[in-house]
Structure formats: C-alpha cells, structure tokens
Amino acid sequence: MTEKSQDIRERVEELREAVRYHSRRYYVEDAPEISDAEYDALYKELAQLEAAYPELITPDSPTQRVGGEPLEGFEEVQHAVPMLSLSNARKVEELREWDARVRRLLGEDEPTYVTELKVDGLAVSLRYENGLFVRGATRGNGTVGEDVTRNLRTIRAIPQKLSDDPPAVLEPRGEVYISLEEFEKLNQKREAAGERTFANPRNLAAGSIRQLDPGVTASRPLTLFLYGVGEGYDNYAGHSEALAALKSYGLRVNPYEVYEDIESVIEECERWAKKRESVGYQVDGVVVKVDSREQQERLGSVQKAPRWAIAYKFEPLARRTKLEKVWVNVGRTGALTPQAVLAPVNVGGVTISRASLHNEDYIKEKGILVGDTVVVERAGDVIPQVVRSIPEERTGAEYRFEMPTECPVCGEPVSRPEGEAVTRCVNTRCPAQALEHITHWSSRGAMDIDGLGEKLATRLFGLGLIKDVAGIYELEAEQLVPLEGFGEKSAENLVRAIEKSKEQPFPRVLYALGIRHVGAVTAALIAERFSGEDLLNGLSVEQLTEIAGIGEVVARAVVEYFALEDNRELVRRLMDLGLNFGAVEAAPAEGPLAGKRVVVTGTLSRPRSYFVEKIEGSGGTFTSSVSKNTDYVLAGEEAGSKLEKARELGVPVLDEAGFEELLERGR
Ligand SMILES: [Zn+2]
C-alpha cells in the first residue's frame, strides 16, 4: 500500500467518525455542535472520496443510507420475540384498578413504574448484530412484519453503527414519526406545488416506511423514538435500565420517569394531558410499565397484551371554529357526503380546514347550521369530525343546510330512498362513479372478466383508455401493448377475456349495471320476466312489484335507473356491442306455495329461518313487508303493525297450525 492511499484511507475513516458523531449530535441528541454548512462539507468530502475510491466504501458508512432499485414488495420477517399490543385505560380509575391487579399478582413484591409518552407513529423493530444495523421490520401483526431495512436506513436518527458496548444481538423497538413542524412544512411545499397534501402525520410516517422506493422514504423527514427491547432484553435488569442503555448506544429515547406509586403516575399522566401539544409531535397517551424484568416475567401476558404495561389514552383533541360552508362530495359509489369547510384551526399541531359531517340526518339531529361556531374533534389518524355546534354563539346569519337535489358532479337528479341515510347520484355514467362501476362490472359475480381487477381498471381509467363500462368492449390489444407490465400476449389475453364476457346471460348483465338494490338474485328475478327492451320501453313500479320477490324499494330504483337518458344510452350502446339483454326462461316454481308471497311476523315457536326455508322450499317467496301483493301473513304472538296492515288490506292471516295445514293440503 502506498503512502498516499494510506493517507486517504485514514482521512475517510476520520470523516466517517466525524459525520457519525455530528449526525448523532444533530439527529439523536438535538444538540448540534457545528453548523449545517460545516456538516454538509464533511459529508460531501466523504462522499467524494468514496466515489473516487469505491474500494473504501463499507456498508456502515454514513453515505450508504440510500441506494438500490425500488423493491417489488417486502419480504416477511418473523419477530423473534412477539411485538405485543397494549391494553388501554381511558380513565384514571382504570390505572388504579390496573395497579391493584399488578400488586395482587406480585404479592409481597412492590412494583416500580416507568412512564413515557406514547408517540402516535408506526411501530418498528431494529436489529443490530455486533453493533451494526442489519435489519428493520414493521410490527405487522405482532408475529410477522415486513422487512423495511432499506427504508429505515434512510432515517438519520437510526445509527448504522452503535456506540458504547452493545450486546451481540440487540433488537430495539420504537415508533417512527414525523414532527408537526416538518409535517406542516412538507404539506405547505406540496400545496405550493399543486400536490395533494397529507391528512395527518401518522399516516404520512406509516406510508413513508412502506414505500417500495427508498428514495421516497429518504425525502420524508422521518425520525423515531425507541421505547423498548425485544431480543437482547435479558441483558438488562428492567425497562429503565434498557432505556438508559439504548441512549448510551446513540439511540433516540423519549424522556421517561420512574415512580414508586400509582398516584404519582396519575399525576404525571394528567400533567401530560394538559401539555401534550407542547412536545411538537403527535402523542395519544402515556405508557406505564412495571420496571423490573423479573416482575414483568412473573406477570406475563394475556391475549397478546402484557399484564405489566398499560396505555393511558388522552381524550380526543377538540377545538372551536366556524363552519364556513358545507361542501358536498360525491363518492365512488355515488353517495353524496356533506363535508364541513371550516375556518382553519390548529388541532394538536395539525391545521384542520375540512371535517366530516357524516350525513344529512347527522347535521339535522345535531342542529348544526351553516355559519355556526362548532366543536371539531380529532383523534389519532381518524378523520376530524364536527361533534356539535354552539348555539349561544349565533348571530342570526346562520342557515340550515339543504342537500342538493342535483348531483354536484354530473348535474343529474339525486335520490334518497325512504329509510336510508344516504343520498345518491343514480346516474351510473356520473364521472364520480364511473370507475367504481367499471370495477363492479368486471367483478366475479357480475361479468367476471379475468384480469381486469380494481388495480388495472384504475390505471386504464386514469389513462383515459376506459371511460365507462361500454368502453371496456372498445379496448384494443394495440392500446395495451405499450403499457408497462403488458406484452403482446397478455394484452391479447385481456381482450379475449373481455370478449368472452359478452357470453354472460342477461341476469348477469342486469346485475352488472349496478342498479341500486339490484343484487344478483333480484336481477335474475327481473330477467325472468322482462327483457332489456322492456326495461328501456319503461316499466312501472306496479309492473315490477308483480314479480314475486320484488318489493317497492327495488322497483322504484329500477324505474329511476331507466328513466335517466344517460343510463338508457349506455344500455343501448351495450346492446349494440352484443351483450345479452334477452329475458331468460324462468324455472317454473313448484309446490303448494308456488308464486305466493308470504310475510312472517311476531314471535313463533321456531326461529324465523325455519319458516323462510319452508316457504321457499314450497315454491313461495318470503318478503318482509306487507302490501296488496302479499298472499299470506304468518303471524305469531305479539305481531304488531304488519298484522294490522294485513287486516287492513284483507290479506289472509295464518297462525302456525294454519300455515302447516296449508303446506299439507297442497301436497
Ligand atoms: Zn353524478
């Protein structure tokens, strides 16, 4: 080795040590000694030397955090020691009960408790062998997680190499998160760039760790706190000793306290509940653990939750703000959902300007008016919601929210069937619903198009290659071949599968149209009586309810569907494309109740399902509501309104004996 190369080797080592040291001061201890520019200069010099002398690169070099091609998927990792979940306490009383239980189980022994904040992020396990970071995994189901080593390597707070003298195998566990400040900064940047903003820090952290491209993870300002040890825990006398050791190895540990009695623990919990928003990251409670490892082992766990630990959960965060207006969103299923547009308000460090109002009835029941001062609540990654209004703050300018009568996306009339909470756009060609409809169309129970799943449908819809379900049949292999993941053969296979679906009989086609309330069974009943032409010519609710098994709700939905010109046009296009719209031959019903509609009500000597089976087994149809089309009502004891209605309409009423007799007679 020449003298020069020896010098370079030494300089590289020196730079690595320096970068590691200052990285720890900055990312782990929050106490930088040098400026960012000085740090960058050291890092840059190291990277340049390594680029010039690649033989000097070692896997634990601070420059080796990001690299490699995106993954196809994650490998599974079996946790050597299961990652348990914690039981929760929502009231301080539950902490006292837990303490009493711990003391009862420990007998003479006095427990000592360790408290620490519960970070709301993504739980991960790190594995160090001889002080080197070799693997990182998500919690997964607690037993098996996903190998996210490459993504975790990009987090500066995770040292590639531990300092001090760690055990040969050490598996620290912790929570990856994003600080509220970084979260807001990132969202502002995205907003300025016209990109979609992230809903909350927890989801962002979790999503970042599960990226297949480590480059994306590296671009997110993630950090973590370690809160425990899986494998290697037996090197320590207890939890607080393990935390102190992790700290000495250069790992980031959340501040913790040790207490002798539960009342002090409760005081600590209440203190944190008050100042939870001051820590700069999302927390949802305080974790309390029995300190001694020996005591932990004696206490053991039940149903995947240790008896020696409990999480005291904070109340959801609530703030007052003004409900500026209600915006109606059209979901993929056509559901119109009212959303609150709020004067931006900071709830637990996250700026909220939208919140859920659930549905029309919720707004009415809560007496919420547009312009009201309202209370908005946010808990963890749950969508923020408006929980109530404050009528005392009204000025008189507030007004009642009215659900639109036309779809805000396509302008077609909307419908809210009686007894349902949701208003829907029933136009299946509404752009808001087109994709959902395509997925339903190709699903197994409907047209069963092999290979056209939700993922591909979303892609083709996004590319504009399929605009609606009729568009599926206009797709050509030549359009697919240039797409990534497609070859000539696979493109032809898909087109063939699409072509083959044209052989599906009319009941399938009718079901695939996705008419509200028309499931596969209902579609079959209609298709036995009417053809596509009949439906296009316009059937009345009465004509449809004549079919045994079709009630008013279904009939109305069918009539509404075929009344819309857009739907009629779609059906005509599908007919032209060669799909089956011809009525099918009905299998004639047989038995003493053939063609009869029977309602069952009241308390009977056997479970209802017994009678339903008897009715259907005798060729009849079981229906739930009484109408003039009902042939019999089987009434048990305490039969209420249905019995009354039957009498009113003059429908024959049977008791159990009469019912059995009827079946006997018919045989
Ligand atoms: Zn619409």
Image (cartoon, rainbow, N blue to C red):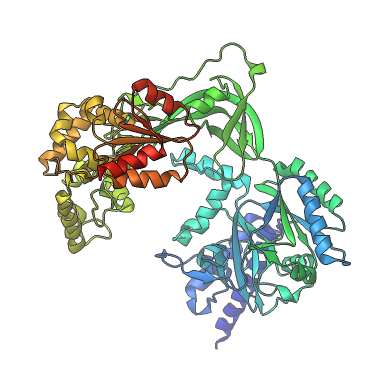
Of residue 346 and residue 577, the one placed in the foreground of this image is 577
Left or right of residue 26, residue 154 in this image: left
Q: Is residue 567 above or below residue 580?
A: above
Residue 297 in which image quadrant? bottom right
Left or right of residue 485, residue 495 in this image: left
Residue at image coords 43%, 43%: 608
Looking at the rendered image, the quarter that the N terminus falls into is bottom right
Residue at image coords 64%, 73%: 14
Count of numbered badges drawn on the protein:
0
Residue 425 in which image quadrant? top left
Of residue 54 and residue 283, the one placed in the foreground of this image is 283
Left or right of residue 545, residue 74 in this image: right
Farthest-out residue, top: 396
Residue at image coords 33%, 52%: 455
- Answer whether residue 405 is visible to the viewer in this image: no
Residue 584 in which image quadrant? top left
- Answer whether residue 152 is visible to the viewer in this image: yes
Q: Position of residue 410 (x, y in %)?
A: 31, 28
Left or right of residue 12, residue 416 in this image: left
Residue at image coords 70%, 57%: 32
Q: Position of residue 272 (x, y in %)?
A: 76, 46
Q: Position of residue 573 (x, y in %)?
A: 14, 37
Q: Position of residue 405 (x, y in %)?
A: 37, 21
Which quadrant of the figure shows ligand 1?
top left
Q: Is residue 131 above or below residue 532?
A: below
Farthest-out residue, bottom: 1
